[in-house]
Amino acid sequence: MDHVIRPEFGETRLDALQRHAFAYFLRETNSANGLVADRTQPGAPASIAAVGFALAAYPVGVERGWLTRADAIERTLALLRFFSTSPQGTASDMTGYKGFYYHFLDMTTGRRADGCELSTVDTSFLLAGEVRVEAQRRAFMRCDPPSLLRTPSPAAWPAAWPNGDGRSCAVARTRWPRRRPRGSSR
């Protein structure tokens, strides 16, 4: 039996897997506002995390030849324009609050979906995607455009911490019960 994995076979499969994963962003994006569906199920809401992943993936897609530069720029700008005018607040028809974004948004309107929560984690993925675009804007757009980052109100991280004043760490002061070690009776 031959248990040797041939590099060329692995690279071919890896390339196919990467191309297939990238195609999700091509199929599941609303071209009008740039939002990306959380899943392929019809009627699924947009996911803020998926949007951040798409922003980080578009330059890679251009480099790999899976997306034209013009299409990547169009998709990126549609999304950044959407967020630059998206409403912030606690009402049910808002997109975010204090620079954080609701976990799920309606794919068409971009408004909060089904009363979902604000998500610091998913907002972080969105901001990371935006930072990737900003870091590569000259190479990505092949010109020197003004900054693309839109954050209408920067994420107010202290507001997300348990006491709201920025003096404590949300991870250290969660209200979740601590997990007991195996075999512990306390």
Image (tube, rainbow, N blue to C red):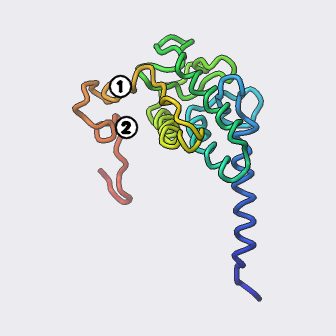
Q: Position of residue 174 (x, y in %)?
A: 33, 36
Residue 41 in the figure: left or right of residue 181: right
Q: Residue 156's mark?
A: 1
What distance separates the C-alpha of mark 2 from that of mark 1?
23 Å
Please identify the residue farthest to the front as the structure is shown: 143
Q: Position of residue 180 (x, y in %)?
A: 35, 51
Which SS class for mark 1?
loop
Which SS class for mark 2?
loop
Residue 152 in the figure: left or right of residue 1: left
In the image, is residue 16 above or below residue 165?
below
In the image, is residue 96 above or below residue 121?
above
Q: Residues within 10 Å of mark 2 (few under 14, many from 20)?
A: few
| Mark 2: amino acid | Trp
In the image, is residue 143 above or below residue 94?
below
Residue at 52% x, 25% y is 102
Look at the numbered discs 2 and 1 and tell me whether their residues touch, using CB distance below 8 Å: no
Residue at 49% x, 20% y is 96
Q: Quadrant of the N terminus?
A: bottom right
Name the residue beneath numbered marker 2: 176
Residue at 74% x, 64% y is 13
Residue at 49% x, 29% y is 146
Q: Position of residue 39 (x, y in %)?
A: 69, 37
| Mark 1: amino acid | Ala
